[in-house]
Image (cartoon, grey):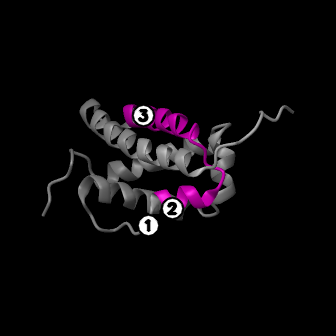
């Protein structure tokens, strides 16, 4: 059995995910993006909690591809990730002991950086002059 990356319980993971997505639903920028893609919040939160349990505790309960999901959405932009990470960091600091929050934040930032780069690099560059509206 592989030891966890850092000390956190499955219940703490579930709590972080629930509080975080509550903040997401209320957020003026990210809320509408998520609302277009998430019809069943409890199922989404369960899937994301499984992702984090896999990433942190090495449970093998997650089956999915975060990069594929973000690319398939079509309206996820690279500039959404710093906002997402700031909200996530705030949630971690509110719920977890400082060392656990820092460790999870570092992991989230590494994952977020990869997703942000993938979203940015896959999107076609806009050619020509900017469109002013």
Can you see residue 74? yes
Residue 133, relative to residue 107: is it above or below? above
64 or 61: nearer the viewer: 64
**Residue 88 at x, y = what percent?**
45, 38
Relative horizontal placement of residue 71, taking residue 100 as reference (left or right):
right
**Residue 96 at x, y = what percent?**
32, 37
- Quadrant including the N terminus: bottom left
7 or 118: nearer the viewer: 118
100 or 70: nearer the viewer: 70
- The nearer-to-camera label among 1 and 3 is 1
The structure residue drawn at horizontal position 62% and vertical position 58%, both measured from the top left corner, is 73
Image: magenta residue range? 67-93
| Residue 46 figure quarter | bottom left
- Label 2, label 1: how many angstroms apart (C-alpha)? 8 Å
Instruction: Using the image, tell me which numbered label, if any, was put on residue 68.
Output: 2
**Residue 23 at x, y = what percent?**
56, 40
Q: Residues within 10 Å of mark 2 (few under 14, many from 20)?
A: few
- The nearer-to-camera label among 2 and 3 is 2
Q: What residue is disc 3 on? A: 89
| Residues tagged 2 and 3 counted as in contact (Cβ below 8 A) | no
């Amino acid at each position: 059995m592989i030891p966890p990356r850092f000390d956190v319980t499955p219940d703490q993971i579930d709590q972080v995910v629930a509080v975080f997505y509550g903040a997401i639903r209320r957020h003026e920028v990210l809320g509408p993006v998520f609302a277009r893609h998430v019809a069943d919040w409890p199922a989404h939160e369960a899937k994301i909690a499984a992702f984090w349990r896999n990433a942190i505790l090495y449970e093998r309960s997650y089956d999915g591809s975060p990069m594929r999901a973000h690319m398939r959405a079509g309206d996820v932009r690279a500039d959404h990730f710093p906002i997402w990470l700031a909200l996530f960091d705030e949630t971690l600091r509110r719920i977890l002991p400082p060392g656990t929050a820092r460790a999870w934040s570092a992991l989230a930032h590494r994952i977020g950086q990869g997703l942000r780069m993938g979203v940015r690099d896959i999107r076609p560059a806009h050619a020509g002059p900017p469109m002013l509206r």
